[in-house]
Image: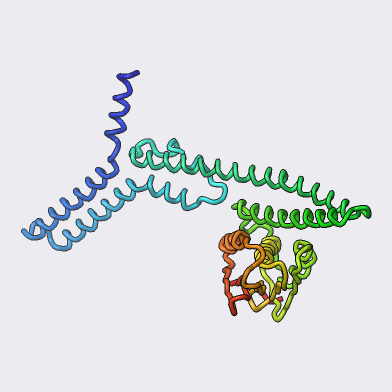
Amino acid sequence: MDRGLPREQGKVQRRAGGFHRRLALIFGLQLLGVVLCVTLGMYDVAPPAAVLVLIVVLSALAWLAARRAWRPVGRLARVVDAWDEQPDLDALAPTRLPGQADADVVSLARGLHGFASRIAGYNLRERNFTRDASHELRSPLTVIKMSADMLSDESELSKFGVRSVKRIQRATREMEALIEALLILARESDVGAGEEEFVVNDVLHRGMDDLRQMLEGRSVDLKLEEPARFALHASPRVFMVLCWQLIRNASQQADHGSIVITVLPGAVAVSNRVDTTPAIDRHGFELAIAQRISERFRWPLELQTRDGSEHIASIRFPETLPA
């Protein structure tokens, strides 16, 4: 076995670099032929027309030979260019290459095949994780939410118990919005999934009750202003989760005041006015999630501060539809 291994390695070493040697041989022979043709023309051995024809023929033969040598590399390039969410891994297998393929091309195919196999494994683990996480995280939250709702209907609860139940309900709603946002970011296949044409104003109207429940327990007034009206072709769930994150971020900056959602031409703005010393300093986490969602779905997020106390977060939608 030990004696056979060096011989196999020697074969690979002899084959490695064959592609470059073949190209060098092709263009070297072409150069030699051109020099010979020019020499024949200089000494009037052949007429100029024949010399030109010979040069054209030699160039065409060199081009055909180089194209044939490049064919395995071009095939790999076409396979990689045709990749989609479910690529054909067998198309990159080194066994699919011609028997006379150069060792460099075989090594390239082997590396691409291994890389594609690892990516396919990552995608499979991602789908399994998000599916299991979605079920295992939402089920306990549903139980907690239902139990808190049942407790809130109890007439014998003390004031302390009522406040505790409201805190549980608010935390559950915030956790639901957070899990939904994280699962959207975790799923690569969610881009383009569940898309439909919807009116932004209608989706916001339907979600106002849930948004107010999420803010329950805070002295914050939520308002919706609609100086404009437009539609989108996208996922309404993703749009609403993005709005949730911006509203959660605004609610973290002060315990009182108002949050205004404004529908502008081609944009939705969330504004709030805060004191110079916010009661709760948790700014950033919800905004970071909103920024990642906006980048993921190509909806630019712009932040502004007016008069030092009014914060405005605007989502701009490049492709809008008439409502």
Relative to the observer, which residue lies in front, 214 or 5? 214
Relative to 72, residue 283 above or below: below
Give the residue displayed 65% in from the left and 52% down from the top.
183
Give the x, y percent position of residue 138: 74, 48
Relative to the observer, which residue lies in front, 116 or 25? 116
Relative to 97, residue 220 above or below: below
Q: Residue furthest right?
A: 155
Q: How is the image coloured?
A: rainbow
Give the residue displayed 72% in from the left and 70% down from the top.
256
Residue 246 seen anywhere in this rendered image of the structure:
no
Image quarter of the N terminus: top left
Q: Residue furthest bottom?
A: 227
Give the x, y percent position of residue 302: 57, 71
Left-right relation of 3 to 322? left
Relative to the observer, which residue lies in front, 21 or 38? 21
Give the residue displayed 69% in from the left and 66% down from the top.
251
Give the x, y percent position of residue 258: 72, 73
Residue 304 seen anywhere in this rendered image of the structure:
yes
Left-right relation of 167 to 122? right
Q: How many marks?
A: 0
Relative to the observer, which residue lies in front, 138 or 24? 138
Give the x, y percent position of residue 109: 41, 41
Give the residue displayed 29% in from the left and 35% down from the top.
15
